[in-house]
Image (tube, helix red, strand yellow):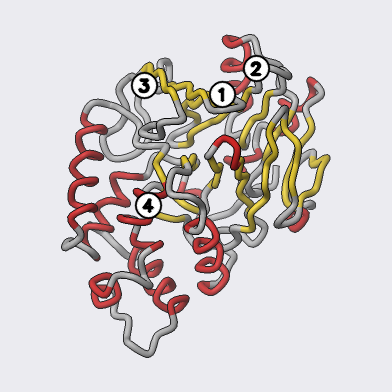
Amino acid sequence: MTNLFSIAYKPLKNRNIKAICTLFLTSSRAATGFINKSQPPMSTAKYAKFDVAQFSCLDDNYGYLIHDPVTGDTAAVDTPDAKTYQSELDKRGWKLTHILNTHHHWDHTGGNLELKRGGALVYGATADADRLPGLDVALAPNDKMKFGNSEGHIIDVGGHTNGHIAFYFPENDCVFVGDALFSLGCGKMFEGTPSQFWGSLKRLRALPDETTIYCAHEYTTGNAKFAMSVEPGNPDLVSRNEEILAKRSRGEPTVPSLMKEEKATNPFLRGDVSEEIRKNVGATDSDSFDVVFGKIRRAKDTFRG
């Protein structure tokens, strides 16, 4: 989907000990995305107060359904493809009650209108109210929302887009970040500024180490190549890169990840702690860390490794 992003947008553990994961895995493309759409990778993780179902959508998106087994509430995190989401709902016997939009891009909102016909409410950023199809509940940064027996905290993660938000559920130790943060990467800076985006990533980085990060795309292999090019001397990164290559060779997803992994290996979170990264992207001692972040982002944009 990234080739379309540069043209236009249409509004339209894992190792966490608190999560018990059952994985049903099939083959997927070694570098990014999925090749077997009739049998996409699927997983279900059980947290303190809800379950998270993960499945593939479109070319390289991940879809997520959050289900509270006590109240029966079920949320779709973004809606890349209504047909896929409805199929996943039907096979589990879940009824959709919430749609949580992280940002306005078409591969995150394309199924909103079709899926809300059953009565689900669409939640999204006030800043994107005119770009989120079918928006019912507008949310501002630092707002809190009720979902079943859990409380979602709204985090401003603007940068990829100006109105981008993340949904953080502290009682369940997980956050849904859309395209703001990826496994070993972050989204392209289409609308924001380096200062804005760096501030957003610092807010995410401040979450507890054991927070599970659910991002929206399987981009990790490409991200790892770039990360290795700017911080090859990081032993945690070297080890993680080997683990990622092994997972993808077996057709396994690399998402979700843990915040402690991202803090130790994701170059976009490390511009203020890694002299090696700063040197390799041409940053100087006089550069502020938001400027350093901008140089890391530009280096990734032009990376052809």
Q: Earlier in the sequence, mark 1 or mark 3?
A: 3
The residue carrying mark 4 is: 262
Q: Earlier in the sequence, mark 2 or mark 4?
A: 2
The amino acid type, in three-letter code, at marker 2 is Pro
How far, Cα to Cα, is label 2 from label 4?
30 Å
Q: Single out the mark in the foreground, 3 or 2.
A: 2
The amino acid type, in three-letter code, at marker 3 is Asn
Identify the image quadrant of residue 233: bottom left
Q: Nearer the viewer, residue 53 or 45?
A: 45
How far, Cα to Cα, is label 4 from label 3?
28 Å
Residue 69's disc is 2
Residue at coordinates 80% horizontally, 48% vertically from top-left? 138
Q: Secondary structure at mark 3?
A: loop
How far, Cα to Cα, is label 2 from label 1?
8 Å
Q: Position of residue 124 (x, y in %)?
A: 73, 46
Q: Earlier in the sequence, mark 4 or mark 3?
A: 3
Q: Secondary structure at mark 1?
A: strand
Q: Nearer the viewer, residue 125 or 174?
A: 174
Give yes or no for contact between labels 2 and 1 (Cβ–Cβ under 8 Å): yes
Q: Position of residue 140 (x, y in %)?
A: 75, 55
How far, Cα to Cα, is label 4 from label 1?
23 Å
Q: Residues within 10 Å of mark 3 (few under 14, many from 20)?
A: few
Give yes or no for contact between labels 2 and 4 (Cβ–Cβ under 8 Å): no
How far, Cα to Cα, is label 3 from label 2?
30 Å
Q: Is residue 19 left or right of residue 26?
A: right
How far, Cα to Cα, is label 1 from label 3?
25 Å
The residue carrying mark 1 is: 51
The residue carrying mark 3 is: 36
Q: Position of residue 21 (x, y in %)?
A: 42, 22
Q: Earlier in the sequence, mark 3 or mark 2?
A: 3
